[in-house]
Protein backbone atom coordinates (compact mmCIF):
# COMPACT_ATOMS: atom_id res chain seq x y z
CA UNK A 1 0.00 0.00 0.00
CA UNK A 2 1.36 3.43 -0.96
CA UNK A 3 0.06 6.62 0.66
CA UNK A 4 0.78 9.88 -1.15
CA UNK A 5 2.39 12.85 0.59
CA UNK A 6 -0.64 14.97 -0.34
CA UNK A 7 -2.87 12.60 1.63
CA UNK A 8 -0.47 12.68 4.58
CA UNK A 9 -0.55 16.50 4.51
CA UNK A 10 -4.34 16.40 4.47
CA UNK A 11 -4.43 14.10 7.49
CA UNK A 12 -1.87 16.24 9.34
CA UNK A 13 -3.68 19.52 8.75
CA UNK A 14 -6.99 18.06 9.96
CA UNK A 15 -5.27 16.65 13.04
CA UNK A 16 -3.72 20.05 13.80
CA UNK A 17 -6.78 22.17 13.00
CA UNK A 18 -9.40 19.88 14.52
CA UNK A 19 -12.02 20.59 11.84
CA UNK A 20 -12.37 20.24 8.09
CA UNK A 21 -13.45 23.86 7.75
CA UNK A 22 -10.22 25.08 9.35
CA UNK A 23 -7.93 22.62 7.58
CA UNK A 24 -9.27 22.93 4.03
CA UNK A 25 -8.18 26.57 3.36
CA UNK A 26 -4.64 25.77 4.48
CA UNK A 27 -4.49 23.17 1.71
CA UNK A 28 -6.14 25.34 -0.92
CA UNK A 29 -9.27 23.22 -1.18
CA UNK A 30 -12.93 23.37 -0.22
CA UNK A 31 -14.37 21.64 2.82
CA UNK A 32 -16.34 19.06 0.74
CA UNK A 33 -13.19 18.20 -1.23
CA UNK A 34 -11.20 17.75 1.97
CA UNK A 35 -13.95 15.52 3.34
CA UNK A 36 -13.98 13.33 0.22
CA UNK A 37 -10.19 13.05 0.25
CA UNK A 38 -10.22 12.02 3.92
CA UNK A 39 -12.88 9.35 3.35
CA UNK A 40 -10.90 7.99 0.39
CA UNK A 41 -7.74 7.83 2.54
CA UNK A 42 -9.53 6.00 5.35
CA UNK A 43 -10.98 3.58 2.80
CA UNK A 44 -7.53 2.97 1.35
CA UNK A 45 -6.08 2.33 4.82
CA UNK A 46 -9.15 0.38 5.93
CA UNK A 47 -9.05 2.33 9.17
CA UNK A 48 -10.94 5.20 10.76
CA UNK A 49 -8.42 7.96 11.54
CA UNK A 50 -10.77 10.39 13.28
CA UNK A 51 -13.76 10.25 15.55
CA UNK A 52 -16.30 12.83 14.35
CA UNK A 53 -17.72 14.74 17.33
CA UNK A 54 -19.77 17.96 17.68
CA UNK A 55 -16.60 19.63 18.97
CA UNK A 56 -14.51 18.56 15.98
CA UNK A 57 -12.32 15.71 14.80
CA UNK A 58 -10.53 13.62 17.43
CA UNK A 59 -7.82 11.12 16.58
CA UNK A 60 -8.61 7.44 16.96
CA UNK A 61 -5.92 4.99 18.08
CA UNK A 62 -5.09 4.38 14.41
CA UNK A 63 -4.94 8.13 13.87
CA UNK A 64 -2.60 8.60 16.83
CA UNK A 65 -0.25 5.97 15.38
CA UNK A 66 -0.33 7.62 11.95
CA UNK A 67 0.27 11.08 13.45
CA UNK A 68 3.74 10.12 14.67
CA UNK A 69 4.81 9.05 11.18
CA UNK A 70 3.07 12.01 9.51
CA UNK A 71 4.89 14.54 11.70
CA UNK A 72 8.26 12.93 10.91
CA UNK A 73 7.44 13.04 7.20
CA UNK A 74 6.47 16.72 7.50
CA UNK A 75 9.72 17.56 9.29
CA UNK A 76 11.74 15.85 6.55
CA UNK A 77 9.75 17.59 3.80
CA UNK A 78 10.26 20.98 5.47
CA UNK A 79 13.98 20.32 5.90
CA UNK A 80 14.27 19.42 2.21
CA UNK A 81 12.36 22.57 1.25
CA UNK A 82 14.68 24.73 3.35
CA UNK A 83 17.77 23.08 1.84
CA UNK A 84 16.58 23.63 -1.71
CA UNK A 85 15.51 27.19 -0.97
CA UNK A 86 18.82 27.91 0.74
CA UNK A 87 20.67 26.94 -2.41
CA UNK A 88 18.64 29.30 -4.58
CA UNK A 89 20.69 32.18 -5.95
CA UNK A 90 19.87 35.66 -7.11
CA UNK A 91 17.83 38.49 -5.65
CA UNK A 92 14.41 37.33 -6.72
CA UNK A 93 11.54 35.48 -5.10
CA UNK A 94 9.63 35.92 -1.87
CA UNK A 95 10.61 36.54 1.75
CA UNK A 96 8.13 36.05 4.59
CA UNK A 97 8.91 38.20 7.65
CA UNK A 98 7.20 38.00 11.06
CA UNK A 99 7.27 40.65 13.78
CA UNK A 100 4.99 42.36 16.29
CA UNK A 101 2.46 44.82 14.93
CA UNK A 102 3.94 48.02 16.37
CA UNK A 103 7.55 47.10 15.51
CA UNK A 104 6.45 46.29 11.96
CA UNK A 105 4.67 49.63 11.64
CA UNK A 106 7.11 51.92 13.41
CA UNK A 107 10.49 50.34 12.59
CA UNK A 108 10.36 47.83 9.76
CA UNK A 109 7.93 49.28 7.21
CA UNK A 110 10.23 52.02 5.89
CA UNK A 111 13.46 49.97 5.49
CA UNK A 112 11.48 47.07 3.99
CA UNK A 113 9.91 49.47 1.49
CA UNK A 114 13.38 50.77 0.57
CA UNK A 115 14.64 47.21 0.10
CA UNK A 116 11.67 46.31 -2.10
CA UNK A 117 12.26 49.40 -4.24
CA UNK A 118 15.93 48.52 -4.67
CA UNK A 119 15.16 44.87 -5.52
CA UNK A 120 11.98 44.83 -7.64
CA UNK A 121 12.13 41.07 -8.22
CA UNK A 122 11.88 40.34 -4.48
CA UNK A 123 8.46 40.25 -2.80
CA UNK A 124 8.33 40.96 0.94
CA UNK A 125 5.44 39.49 2.93
CA UNK A 126 5.31 41.13 6.35
CA UNK A 127 3.18 39.36 8.96
CA UNK A 128 2.53 41.93 11.70
CA UNK A 129 1.33 39.96 14.71
CA UNK A 130 2.47 39.49 18.30
CA UNK A 131 2.32 35.70 17.75
CA UNK A 132 5.67 34.72 16.26
CA UNK A 133 5.66 32.31 13.31
CA UNK A 134 7.71 29.10 13.40
CA UNK A 135 11.06 29.12 11.60
CA UNK A 136 11.43 25.35 11.82
CA UNK A 137 8.17 24.78 9.94
CA UNK A 138 8.97 27.46 7.34
CA UNK A 139 6.02 29.55 8.49
CA UNK A 140 8.44 32.47 8.09
CA UNK A 141 11.88 32.99 6.58
CA UNK A 142 12.85 35.58 9.20
CA UNK A 143 11.43 36.43 12.61
CA UNK A 144 12.14 39.53 14.71
CA UNK A 145 11.27 39.26 18.38
CA UNK A 146 12.06 40.61 21.84
CA UNK A 147 14.04 37.69 23.22
CA UNK A 148 16.89 35.51 21.92
CA UNK A 149 16.06 32.35 20.01
CA UNK A 150 16.77 29.00 21.66
CA UNK A 151 16.58 26.54 18.74
CA UNK A 152 19.95 25.00 17.80
CA UNK A 153 19.27 25.47 14.08
CA UNK A 154 18.50 29.20 14.28
CA UNK A 155 21.02 31.83 13.18
CA UNK A 156 20.42 35.01 15.17
CA UNK A 157 21.79 38.45 15.93
CA UNK A 158 20.74 41.45 17.97
CA UNK A 159 19.21 44.04 15.67
CA UNK A 160 18.50 46.94 18.02
CA UNK A 161 17.66 48.02 21.56
CA UNK A 162 14.30 49.65 22.23
CA UNK A 163 14.14 52.36 24.90
CA UNK A 164 10.92 52.85 26.86
CA UNK A 165 9.53 55.89 28.62
CA UNK A 166 6.68 56.85 30.94
CA UNK A 167 4.14 59.11 29.24
CA UNK A 168 1.05 61.13 30.08
CA UNK A 169 -1.18 63.49 28.15
CA UNK A 170 -1.33 67.18 28.97
CA UNK A 171 -5.00 66.76 29.91
CA UNK A 172 -4.13 64.02 32.41
CA UNK A 173 -1.36 66.13 33.96
CA UNK A 174 -3.60 69.19 34.28
CA UNK A 175 -6.21 67.13 36.10
CA UNK A 176 -4.00 64.90 38.25
CA UNK A 177 -0.56 66.54 38.26
CA UNK A 178 2.67 64.59 38.59
CA UNK A 179 5.00 64.30 41.57
CA UNK A 180 6.42 60.83 41.11
CA UNK A 181 3.33 58.94 42.14
CA UNK A 182 4.32 57.83 45.66
CA UNK A 183 2.89 54.35 46.18
CA UNK A 184 0.54 54.84 43.24
CA UNK A 185 -2.68 55.41 45.18
CA UNK A 186 -5.02 57.19 42.78
CA UNK A 187 -2.82 56.61 39.72
CA UNK A 188 -4.43 55.12 36.61
CA UNK A 189 -2.13 53.00 34.45
CA UNK A 190 -2.25 51.76 30.84
CA UNK A 191 -0.37 48.52 30.25
CA UNK A 192 -0.13 45.23 28.39
CA UNK A 193 -2.98 42.75 28.84
CA UNK A 194 -2.84 39.97 31.42
CA UNK A 195 -1.51 37.42 28.93
CA UNK A 196 1.60 39.62 28.58
CA UNK A 197 1.59 40.86 32.15
CA UNK A 198 5.00 39.32 32.85
CA UNK A 199 6.78 41.78 30.57
CA UNK A 200 9.47 43.93 32.17
CA UNK A 201 7.66 47.25 31.74
CA UNK A 202 4.50 45.93 33.45
CA UNK A 203 6.62 44.59 36.33
CA UNK A 204 8.37 47.99 36.53
CA UNK A 205 5.02 49.77 36.92
CA UNK A 206 3.84 47.33 39.59
CA UNK A 207 7.08 47.71 41.58
CA UNK A 208 6.98 51.51 41.48
CA UNK A 209 3.27 51.97 42.16
CA UNK A 210 1.84 48.88 43.89
CA UNK A 211 -1.36 50.71 44.83
CA UNK A 212 -2.12 52.02 41.32
CA UNK A 213 -5.03 50.65 39.31
CA UNK A 214 -5.16 49.75 35.63
CA UNK A 215 -7.38 51.92 33.46
CA UNK A 216 -6.80 49.95 30.26
CA UNK A 217 -4.85 46.85 29.26
CA UNK A 218 -4.14 45.88 25.66
CA UNK A 219 -1.68 43.76 23.68
CA UNK A 220 -1.43 46.67 21.20
CA UNK A 221 1.16 49.32 21.98
CA UNK A 222 -0.48 51.69 19.51
CA UNK A 223 -3.86 51.27 21.26
CA UNK A 224 -2.13 52.04 24.57
CA UNK A 225 -0.64 55.20 23.08
CA UNK A 226 -4.02 56.38 21.77
CA UNK A 227 -5.65 55.75 25.14
CA UNK A 228 -2.85 57.70 26.83
CA UNK A 229 -3.35 60.62 24.43
CA UNK A 230 -7.03 60.64 25.43
CA UNK A 231 -6.03 61.02 29.09
CA UNK A 232 -6.96 57.53 30.30
CA UNK A 233 -3.80 57.20 32.39
CA UNK A 234 -0.02 56.85 32.44
CA UNK A 235 1.59 54.50 29.93
CA UNK A 236 5.02 52.97 29.45
CA UNK A 237 5.62 53.05 25.71
CA UNK A 238 8.50 52.43 23.30
CA UNK A 239 10.15 55.80 22.70
CA UNK A 240 9.66 55.37 18.94
CA UNK A 241 5.90 55.49 19.60
CA UNK A 242 5.62 57.82 22.58
CA UNK A 243 7.87 60.53 21.14
CA UNK A 244 5.81 60.67 17.92
CA UNK A 245 2.43 61.46 19.49
CA UNK A 246 1.25 64.44 21.61
CA UNK A 247 2.37 63.08 24.98
CA UNK A 248 4.71 64.31 27.70
CA UNK A 249 7.70 62.15 28.63
CA UNK A 250 7.76 62.11 32.44
CA UNK A 251 10.95 62.25 34.46
CA UNK A 252 11.46 59.26 36.76
CA UNK A 253 14.42 58.32 38.91
CA UNK A 254 14.67 54.86 37.35
CA UNK A 255 13.79 54.69 33.64
CA UNK A 256 11.64 51.79 32.42
CA UNK A 257 13.79 48.87 31.26
CA UNK A 258 14.86 48.74 27.63
CA UNK A 259 14.44 45.60 25.50
CA UNK A 260 16.58 44.02 22.80
CA UNK A 261 15.19 42.96 19.43
CA UNK A 262 16.63 39.78 17.92
CA UNK A 263 16.60 38.77 14.27
CA UNK A 264 16.59 35.05 13.46
CA UNK A 265 16.35 32.66 10.52
CA UNK A 266 16.95 28.95 9.95
CA UNK A 267 20.55 27.99 9.23
CA UNK A 268 19.48 26.15 6.07
CA UNK A 269 18.75 29.58 4.58
CA UNK A 270 22.23 31.02 5.19
CA UNK A 271 23.04 30.75 1.49
CA UNK A 272 19.83 32.39 0.33
CA UNK A 273 21.09 35.56 -1.36
CA UNK A 274 17.94 37.62 -0.97
CA UNK A 275 17.72 36.80 2.74
CA UNK A 276 21.38 37.69 3.32
CA UNK A 277 20.85 40.95 1.44
CA UNK A 278 17.80 41.80 3.57
CA UNK A 279 19.63 41.05 6.83
CA UNK A 280 22.51 43.34 5.78
CA UNK A 281 20.03 46.03 4.75
CA UNK A 282 18.15 45.94 8.07
CA UNK A 283 21.37 45.98 10.12
CA UNK A 284 22.51 49.06 8.20
CA UNK A 285 19.13 50.83 8.18
CA UNK A 286 17.91 50.26 11.74
CA UNK A 287 19.84 52.22 14.43
CA UNK A 288 21.46 50.21 17.19
CA UNK A 289 19.30 52.00 19.77
CA UNK A 290 15.80 53.37 19.22
Image (cartoon, helix red, strand yellow):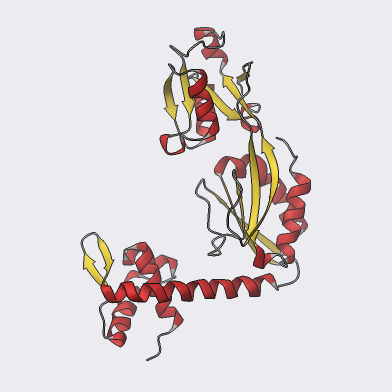
Q: Position of residue 159 (x, y in %)?
A: 70, 45
Front-lying residue, 48 or 32: 48
Specify whether 61 is left or right of 67. Answer: left
Residue 35 visible at all: no
Front-lying residue, 276 or 68: 68
Q: Position of residue 289 (x, y in %)?
A: 72, 36
* Above or below for 178 versus 108: above
Task: Tell me the quarter of the image containing the N terminus.
Answer: bottom left
Residue at coordinates 73% horizontally, 49% vertically from top-left?
A: 282
Q: Position of residue 30 (x, y in %)?
A: 37, 70
Picture quarter containing residue 168? top right
Residue 111 visible at all: yes
Front-lying residue, 280 or 23: 280
Picture quarter containing residue 105? top right
Residue at coordinates 36% horizontally, 62% vertically from top-left?
A: 17
Q: Position of residue 215 (x, y in %)?
A: 42, 22
Specify whether 92 is left or right of 172. Answer: right
Residue at coordinates 44% horizontally, 79% vertically from top-left?
A: 6
Amino acid sequence: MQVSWDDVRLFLEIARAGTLSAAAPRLGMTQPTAGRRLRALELQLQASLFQRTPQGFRLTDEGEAMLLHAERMAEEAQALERKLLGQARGLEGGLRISSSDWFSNQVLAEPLADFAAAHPRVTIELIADWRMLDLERREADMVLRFRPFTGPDIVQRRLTTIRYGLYASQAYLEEHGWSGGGTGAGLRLIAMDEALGQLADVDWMRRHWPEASFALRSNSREAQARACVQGAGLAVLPRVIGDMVPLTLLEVEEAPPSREVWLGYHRDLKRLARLRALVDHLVAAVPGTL
